[in-house]
Structures are given as structure tokens and as C-alpha cells.
Image: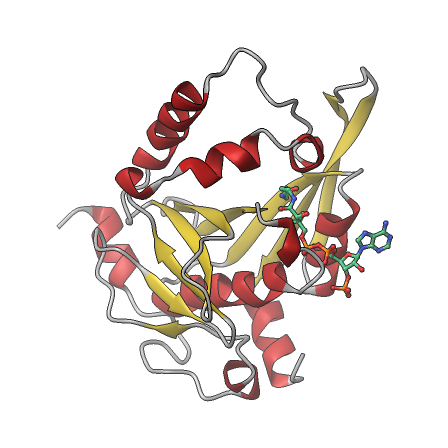
Amino acid sequence: MAESDAQATKPAAAGAGGETDSPQSRQGQGARRASWKPGNPLVLVTKNFLLRSVPPEKVGPWYVGWLQDPELMAFLNMEPRKDDTPEKALERMRRYVARADNRTNFHLGVFPKDRAQQIGFFSVDMDFRNGTAQTRVVIGEKDYWGKHVVRETRAAIIEFVFRTTNFVKVWGMTSSRNVPSVYNYKAQGFQNEGVMRQHIRTVDGDRIDVILFGLMRDEWTKRKEQGL
Ligand SMILES: CC(C)(COP(=O)(O)OP(=O)(O)OC[C@H]1O[C@@H](n2cnc3c(N)ncnc32)[C@H](O)[C@@H]1OP(=O)(O)O)[C@@H](O)C(=O)NCCC(=O)NCCS
């Protein structure tokens, strides 16, 4: 068994393995873990959404629409690529998604429970050497902005990481101008772990900061105990 397999299946010190019955899970904040083994697709369930591994062949034209949306891409500090045909854009996205092995990297589609349509995705990178997981999120369907999708679904990922592994931290980063993203990290208990000053150039040519956010296992546990 590879080291990552062994560690991935190693139960977390506290409360590993079982279904959570905390107030958070009843409110859809916690992950209800389907039976998952390293390398198998992952499904997580929250109150209103399903998160599930999307294989490259299931990446559809809706991804292209998202990548060509200037407002969405501005949050990511990118411009839609003008040289891309829809076919090329789809192919590029499928290559990106193909790196997810459901072991050290997950590409999880976000699906409302009441609609078949995918509305966004998370990418989760598991660093087994250091016991940390990085998440990135895009909610592509703008009808779903402002509906707490990110916090509800990321809670399920955080819960999955801490329950399934002995990892110590979940982290992410965002540009200082991405107000919704900064807001979401803070509202979910992530701490500002540092600022990379003038780290990126915006599409307008300004230089702006990137903020690192981290949430330690014990901080997450404490929040749950407090019913946050
Ligand atoms: C960033 C993104 C994921 C946020 O989606 P979202 O959570 O639905 O965003 P919201 O509009 O609900 O904003 C989140 C929170 O920030 C608050 N907020 C947003 N803009 C704000 C502003 N200008 N001033 C004050 N608060 C603001 C909202 O009120 C909301 O708070 P609430 O949940 O308590 O109501 C989504 O915009 C997206 O997919 N963007 C493109 C990709 C991206 O930027 N990913 C993150 C990169 S790290």
C-alpha cells in the first residue's frame, strides 16, 4: 500500500469514521461521508447540495461558459482567453480535471439536490507529507451567488478532511480584492496566515496582495462545539 493510501485511511484522532450527528450536520454543515476508499469517486452530502467527483468526460460546455464569464474570471484575476474556441477551452478544462485521482487531488462538482445541473466545483489538493489540504472553489452559476453555497459545501470538505485523515490544516488563498472570498474564509473561522504583498498583477495592470487563510483542526472542532 502506498504511503498516501495508508495515511488517507488512517482515522483521525477524534470522532473518526462514523456519521456526524452534530447540530452542524443536521443543518447541512457537516459532511455525511459515503463509503469512500482512496482512488474511488467521492460523494459528500450537505443540506442543500451534493459534492461529487467529476471525471473528465463529464466536464461539459457549462464549464466553458464559466471560463468565458468576465465577471467570474475577474474574481480569479484572469481574463477569458480570447484565442480559445469552445472546443479548445473544453479540452483544456478536461485536461485540468484529469489530474484528479481521488487520492491526492479531488475535482468535486457542486450540484443542488433539487436540480441535476452542476453549478460549480471545488478542487482539493491533499498534501500527505505535511498533513494539509488546500481548497479552491468556483461557483459558476451566478444565480447561486449570495446563497451561502461556498460555506455550506466547504464545511463538508473540511469535515471530510479532518474525519478521514490526521491532517492538521485546511487552507486556501485569494486576492485581497476578492471580497466575497475573503468574507467567506473569515466567516468560516479561517485565520489570516499571511499576506503576499503585491503578489499578482490584475487585468488592469495594478499589483495587489494575495491573502493566505488557514483553519486548524482544533479550531474547527472548537467551532463545532460552539455550534458555529
Ligand atoms: C467567490 C465566490 C465563490 C463567492 O460566492 P458566494 O459565496 O456566493 O458569494 P457571496 O456573494 O454570497 O458573498 C459572500 C459573502 O460576502 C459578502 N460580500 C460580498 N461582497 C461584499 C462586499 N462588497 N462588501 C461586503 N460584503 C460582501 C456577502 O454579503 C456574503 O456574506 P453573507 O453570506 O453573510 O451574506 C463566487 O463569487 C465565485 O465563484 N467567484 C469566482 C471564483 C472565485 O473567485 N473563487 C475564489 C477564489 S479563491
Work out whether 218 lies above or below 5: below
The extreme right residue here reads 206
Residue 21: which quarter of the image? bottom left
Is 31 or 117 nearer to us in this picture?
117
Is 45 or 13 nearer to us in this picture?
45
In the image, 176: left or right of 99? right
Q: How is the image coloured?
A: secondary structure
Q: Position of residue 193 (x, y in %)?
A: 70, 47
Is 34 or 88 nearer to us in this picture?
88
Looking at the image, which residue is at 65% across and 25% down? 78
In the image, 198: left or right of 158? right
Viewer can see residue 99: no
- Report the number of numbered marks: 0
Q: Position of residue 161 (x, y in %)?
A: 42, 61
In the image, 149: left or right of 187? left
Residue 116: which quarter of the image? bottom left
Viewer can see residue 104: yes
Work out whether 173 lies above or below 36: above
Q: Position of residue 22 (x, y in %)?
A: 51, 87
The extreme top residue here reads 83
Work out whether 2 lies above or below 188: above
Q: Quadrant of the C terminus?
A: bottom right
Looking at the image, which residue is at 56% across and 75% down? 221
Work out whether 171 lies above or below 51: above
